[in-house]
Amino acid sequence: MAQALNDNSAPAAASLKAESPRKASFTGWLIAGLAIGLLAWWLYGKSWPQLLQSLTNAALLAGGLTLVIFLHELGHFLAAKWCDVHVETFSIGFGPPIPGLSFRKGETFYKVAWIPLGGYVKMLGELPGEQADPEVLNNPRAYQNKPVGQRMLIISAGVIMNLLLGAGCFVYAYMAGKSEVLPLVGYVEPGSRADQAGLEPGSLVLQVNRNTRPAFEDLMFASATARADVTPIYLQWQTPGGEVREAHLVPRKLPHDQRPLLGLGPMPGLRLARLDIDEAEPVYPESPAAQKGFRSGDVLLGVRKVTDGAEYPFISPNEYQHEDAELRVRALRQANRVLYRLRSEPVAFQLWRPDTNETISLEVPPNPVRWLGLSLQLGPIVSVNPTTQEACISETQLQVGDLIVAINDQPVGDPFRLPERLEALAGQTLRLSVRRGQTQLIVPVRPVAEKPSWWEYAPSRPLAPWPIPALGITCRVEPILAEDLDSQKFHATDAETHQPLRLPAGTRFTQIELQDRSLRYPNHWRGATYRFSDDETQADAVAWPYLFWSLQGTLVSPEVVLTAQIPSEEGPIVKRVRLLAQPMPNWFNPDRGLIRDREKIIHHAANPWQAIYLGLRDTHRMVVNIYLTLKNLFTGDISIRLLSGPAGIVGMGYEMASLGFNYFVWFLGVISINLAVINFLPIPLLDGGHMVFLIIEKLRGRPVSRRVIEYAGLLGLVLLLLLLIIATTMDITRFLAR
């Protein structure tokens, strides 16, 4: 019998000889040269400490991804050996072996190949072309001759190993301390589902569906994996005033959104961000905080009012080190209130530097609002929230579609200054003149005090309305001048002739041209053109709130060109008008240009059993979320622009490695589970495709025909290549947009 087995394994021996050349092929050396050249280009110009850190992170990333692939293939290998299947090749990667990283032991050829897009275990009799070979047909150790149950075990063993690795990484992370983003709402998009439900900036999320200890990531997962306008998400939260509220929110997905959204984001933390840019300060260029000496990792302890020396503490170094969520929430809410209250004052930021354990003070002047001087028409109300009922003190309530035309018989004025104007009148009874259809109404209101400010309601969507928090409403801002432009303060010129232009009331703007830049390339300006429209299906549609918000950041050029229809006796005259946004007197932005990281706290499991429970819970949640994400990709609820290919995964892994070992272990767990789920999809060439054929074989009592398997394999190859091309294209697009 032993002799027969050796004879029957002759084809396998031949294949082994073909796969184990004594010298590396020319292709292998060519790929090695290209890899070394790319590495040298990437490391060029770095200092020795940066060089050492970069190489350490790269080595950690390479080792981690190799471990994920190795354990997947090891699962197949061990299951095959346990079922007494002849394994010909065990490969990490595809293509020719890397010189010096291949050997043969026994009947199996082991190698690490150049193309790191996975790996494979080649078994005798596995490929359709081998299955008709008489020597394979008569070999009991051939894969095809094993019972269906054993082949199912072999196919699924790689996925099982990846799930175990993912769970193990999660368990380790909870034992060592898992970093989570504090579920504190930092901004709310005006008119969003979160805004309409009454969620305010500064709200602490207490529960997301059944999760009674959520991190902000759980809220984002619940939203991203929901079915837009269908799936309700249960939220319970604590308002900044301490009141506990609850609601079921259904995410929405507008035409250009990449995923279903609730319309909120995390609060900027107390620690200044670490930028993925060499020697970059955590500040925006040309902002008041620029060139003041701020460093990545600095922690904001409080501020001091320069004019009178008044101290406003947020947190102490000892309190910050305690990782107490309640202390962080209190400190962040205090920081928001103080920074807004002192927005017109020069302040000295009190900072703690953990690496040197020193406290320093850096003075920063106020940050005036940048604006073009345009007093635009206030449009109709777009949405209301629970604050509206509190502000309206009679039976006549403000509602969607109402147009506010006067306040106490005085013109509304600049819509962008209206939130602060009403905030200053909080508690006073005001008479709003409102047009509702063809009817004129007087609506008495009392603006609500202690509501979040306009700068915490970020109109980050191009067609977002403008918030008026003291009344709980959002309004459109029409692209029409309500008052003449003050030509003494704001000089409008013809973009072609450079001659001064007068912009009277009634001028309608139809288009805007502006320039922006990125933190990575601050000297490279990119042009963009938008049209003023309320059509969500137009990719270039924009509204004024988004532009006003964008002009407050120094990454957008203050100079714009507007296409305007200027009224005249002969009819509208179309002109391209050049305007320069200028610092506004007595109007200040609380944001002074600091780039603050999201607030993270470390969650330690109380004991190993809790770590195991949390690790298994997160593994199950991750698997479900991946399947829901894939489903939403097919239904269009999630944009393909969110896909990441090998380049994106490598970039993310490098970033995680630079943040610390615990972050990287969690990343490996996520990648391992993603590999398990993706690999078990019913696509030919993947393990899931093989499993489908085995199930069909079990039901039919005979294998699927060779021709069907070959055509299915070709289809699977095309699908996988198409997916790889799309994902890589998305990676390149994101890289070029940085």
Image (spheres, rainbow, N blue to C red):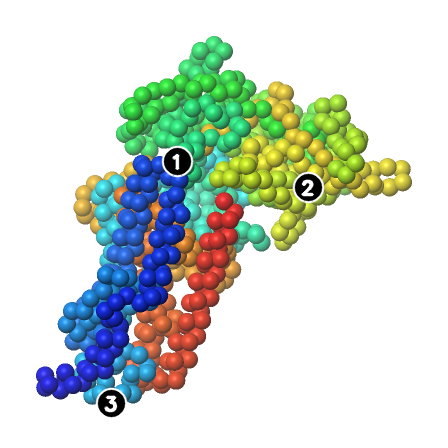
Give amino acid for label 1: Arg
Quarter where residue 709 is shown: bottom left
Tell me the element at label 3: helix
Tell me the element at label 2: strand
In this picture, is 43 found above or below 632?
above
Q: Residue at x 54, y 43 (%)?
A: 192
**Residue contact between numbered discs 2 and 1, judged by CB atoms under 8 Å:** no
Residue neighbourhood size for the residue with mark 3, other residues' Cα within 10 Å, grouped as few (<14), some (14–19), many (≥20)? few
**Residue contact between numbered discs 3 and 1, judged by CB atoms under 8 Å:** no
Tell me the element at label 1: loop
Quadrant for the N terminus in the image? bottom left
Residue neighbourhood size for the residue with mark 2, other residues' Cα within 10 Å, grouped as few (<14), some (14–19), many (≥20)? many
Q: Residue at x 67, y 36 (%)?
A: 560
Q: Label 3: which residue?
A: 134
User: Which residue appears farthest toward the left when viewing the image?
Assistant: 2
Give amino acid for label 2: Ile
Q: Label 1: which residue?
A: 274
Q: Earlier in the sequence, mark 3 or mark 1?
A: 3
Q: Earlier in the sequence, mark 2 or mark 1?
A: 1
In this picture, is 8 found above or below 598?
below
Q: Position of residue 385 (x, y in %)?
A: 55, 38
Give amino acid for label 3: Pro
**Residue contact between numbered discs 3 and 2, judged by CB atoms under 8 Å:** no
Q: Label 2: which residue?
A: 512
Q: Residue at x 23, y 42 (%)?
A: 176
User: Marks 3/2: CA distance?
Assistant: 74 Å
The reply to whether residue 449 is visible in this rendering is no
